[in-house]
Amino acid sequence: MQIKGTKSGLLLHLYDRPLAGAVLELRGKLDASPDFYRGSRAVLMLGGESAEAPELAAVIATLEQYGITADGAVCDSDSSAAVARSAGLRLVAASVAAAPRKVDDRTTPSRNGRARRSQAAHDQTRDADEPVTNVYHKGTVRSGQSFEAEGNLVVVGDVNAGAELIAGGDIIVWGALRGVAHAGARGDDAASVYALRLEATQLRISRCIAAAPPADKRRAHDLLPEIATIRDGRIVIVRADQPHR
Amino acid sequence: MIDFLAKFFRREEASSSRARERLRLVLMSDRVSLAPDIFDAMKGEMLDVLRRYLEIDERGMDVHFENAERQFALMANIPVREVKTHDAIALARRVAVPEGAEFTSAKQTASADAANGSAAQQATMTVPRRRRRRRARTAAIAPLASQPNDDAGTPQSNDDAGTPQPNDDAGAPPPSG
Amino acid sequence: MPDLERDVQDAPAAPAGASSQLQLDAPSAAPVKLGRSIVVTSGKGGVGKTTTTANLGTALADAGRSVVVVDADVGLRNLDVVLGLENRVSKHLLDVIEEKCSLDDALVRDRVRRNLLLMPAAQNREKDDVPEEKMALLVRQLQERFEFVLIDCPAGIEQGFRNAVVGAQEAIVVTTPEVSAVRDADRVIGLLPRNIELKLVVNRVRPAMVKKGTMMSVADVNAILRLDLLGVVPDEREIIIATNRGTPVIDIEGSETGAAFRRIARRMLGEDVPIPSFEDKSNFVTRIMSTLGLGRS
Amino acid sequence: MPGRAFVITSGKGGVGKTTTTANVGCALASLGKQVVLMDADIGLRNLDLVLGLEKRIVFDLVDVAEGRCQPRQALIRDKRLDGLYLLPASQTKNKESIEEDQMREVVRLLVAEFDVVLIDCPAGIEHGFRNAIAGADEAIVVTTPEVSAIRDADRILGMLGQRRARLIVNRVRLEMVKTGDMLAVEDVAEILGREVLGVVPDDEEIIDTTNRGEPIVLDASRRLAKTYIAIARRLIGEDVPLPSFDDDGFFGRLRRLMIGTRSHA
């Protein structure tokens, strides 16, 4: 078991092991310096093994004894995701599990008057009822830039290869989407990606990942607006004018 | 074709030989400027030798490298107050070089070269063109081992052994220290 | 200890020593008209930043402007060898910033063009040694004395990049028609301050390859980057020869590359010089795009 | 026995580090080695593009270094060649987000499982360079026969410490060498004073294959495929002689003689 500190909290690696033994080992580690992690938040990396609900609850309770709030979970399978959700953990895409993303001058999305929440505020969003923030950005999103929205994310402009969009809800790009887009990043299978030109390097919706087809396999209609959604457990791309075909 | 022939025979200066020449000079100056501490050490040792023969005005001394048109040169301008007497020189040499060890000890090879080449009268010394190049590099590479970004942090003396220098002349002086 | 903290923060904002030192070198005339400060950048290395800086500087000098080219690549300087001035470098940019010498001590004047000067980079130092605010101040000092301050940016997006960009009001982004160069250029554009004026130069275009379809066209490149196109420079072996000799390629007779740089310099001076078509600018994809109104004309 | 880690570096950018990494890596895999290609150019990654694997990146080097995933999860297996893997760099972070110790640790984990780790170094000599060389046992210095590239190569040779460093001279144009407009490989080797691991002629095919994300080695009919395979063989210790480049015929020798005489005059 590994406990790693990142800028936004702890990452607790629990994969590759039965959770049953985890509590003891966790105690052993935390006892070494009982107050060291007090007040931090933790994301549990559960992997693909199906976690048992009572054992997961025991891990969360143990963490709380040491003043650590279990805050989210990264799951590689539906079963472990279900258990994590029922234990009150929010699902986090592994790619956003830690690391607050640095925002440089050009990426501060504030044109709609409401900038992205601070990381602290972000972390406290455990209540499903609490309203989420949508983000609106006008202008080209360049390689290396990264936008994140708790709710929906709208970009008016191109999103170039090497750029990254992550949203809890839908992603709408009024322009060419060439970078990576992750909609429904917290496990919302109903989320979609809309783009005038959908040429994404890679699409992720909830826990599904799809790579773009090779350039020569794309047909002429690909120059029309398209929508990416999950159907039967995999990502499909449909033309915007015929969304149900 | 005419163009080709013209180029072939005219060719007052092939640009690659120009490149070779320029690189030779610029790399020597880069390598030297990489190692200010080595340069200071060399200056000190050079002075030690000169002092045995001459009374030197150290405040008026100026030693630096110059990258002149076709030569990379060590320019030393060292004001001499007085040339020592034979006896004084003999005494100074006996103190500095015990038991006839001459100037071949590692620490003093560089300065020995300088002294042999220019003796006391000649204040300006020129590093010969081809021969000396390898030596210049040996000296310039060594101090890098002690720079903070070198993870090994190994002492300088090991550097020679570890750095493959296929054509290095055997007689190249190891860096002092 | 709030006072202490303020002192620390104030320190870089008002580098008293530096400004007084630098002012000594500046002409004493009261309000000076500032020259243009332009950084030549690319993200990816080896796309021709240094060549572009050297040749544009030379061409602008030929047009009668006073020009200083600044090598911001501390530790890996090359502007001096491309201009053939490496023999004459003694002091460098860091010496000036650290007040070890005056501006004039460090500037190297070109042998032929007396209105072209080089501010060399330090070769034995690191980029982290240059404080950004002092760099900005230095560029400002140079702007007071020269009509054009061209800054040759190092590759990458680390401290060297930030130092090169900090004093610039305009940026020339150099790229080549290669996927990786375009991607890196895009990355750099995203990192440049918002208020900087951006222009694009596409370098190393090989018309024959574009025609064969084995190289992206300029239109393809700019469909992604979407910047004002300042110029297109064809690839030529003369560049290598020029660098071997240490002469700017614009001095090599009959060089297409040199001619392209001269045209770019004229555009920088506000002349309306058309960009010759080194290539059939519209390929299949861009034609479809423009039919749909998606491409940029 | 653990594998070996080589850093592929150059100082100057755009001399072909990434292309070399991709092609030597493919060549090694085609010789049956288990190979990881690691992109250390955080924030300006390109190895994924050159290999055509950019669509499959989920985790990256920074994720591994920060423990957000297991090394295995971040490795992308190249489906075209058995035993070839890519560990991509992160594009949205900067080079300061990873430390030399972390790099050393990641490389240590990789050499435990693979025969060869090739680390694609960023241009320059800043933080990213120091990270890239931190875990490497040996260096391959890529340069071109141009003044500025050789000067930068000389600079970084001095920063590689005790590591063995061999040269790949890239973009050699034989016809220009013959006309005296380009430095010969022997000149470059003599100036830099290091062993030459390989010589790669300048070839338009590289631009094309790079744009398409298909390393040239994958197609044995390509002109340069043999060149890279020879380099790979030398790298793993086989004795493959360098092709002789100074044999440029009577005229070349004649001219060389003439130039030689003149330059000493």
Image (spheres, coloured by chain):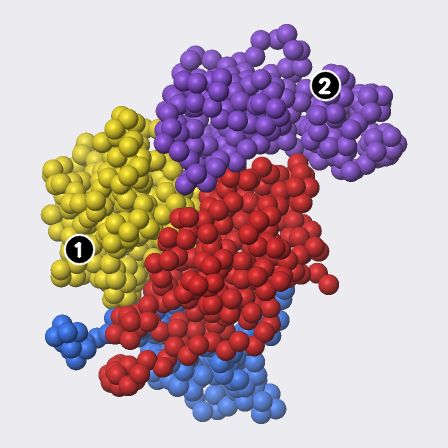
Mark 1 = which residue?
A: C256
Q: Nearer the viewer, mark 1 or mark 2?
A: 2
Mark 1 → mark 2, Cα distance in angstroms: 65 Å
Q: Residue at x 53, y 76 (%)?
A: D240
Q: Chain of mark 1?
A: C
Q: Give the camera-side residue of A59 and B141.
A: A59
Q: Residues within 10 Å of mark 2 (few under 14, many from 20)?
A: some
Q: Chain of mark 2?
A: A
Picture coordinates of residue B97, whole percent (x, y): 56, 86
Q: Helix, strand, or loop for circle 1?
A: helix
Mark 2 = which residue?
A: A85
C296 w.r.t. B137: above or below: above
D153 w.r.t. B12: above or below: above
Query: In the rendered picture, chain C carries what hue?
Result: yellow
Identify the chain drawn in blue: B
Query: In the rendered picture, chain A carries what hue?
Result: purple
- Identified by mark 1, the residue type is Glu
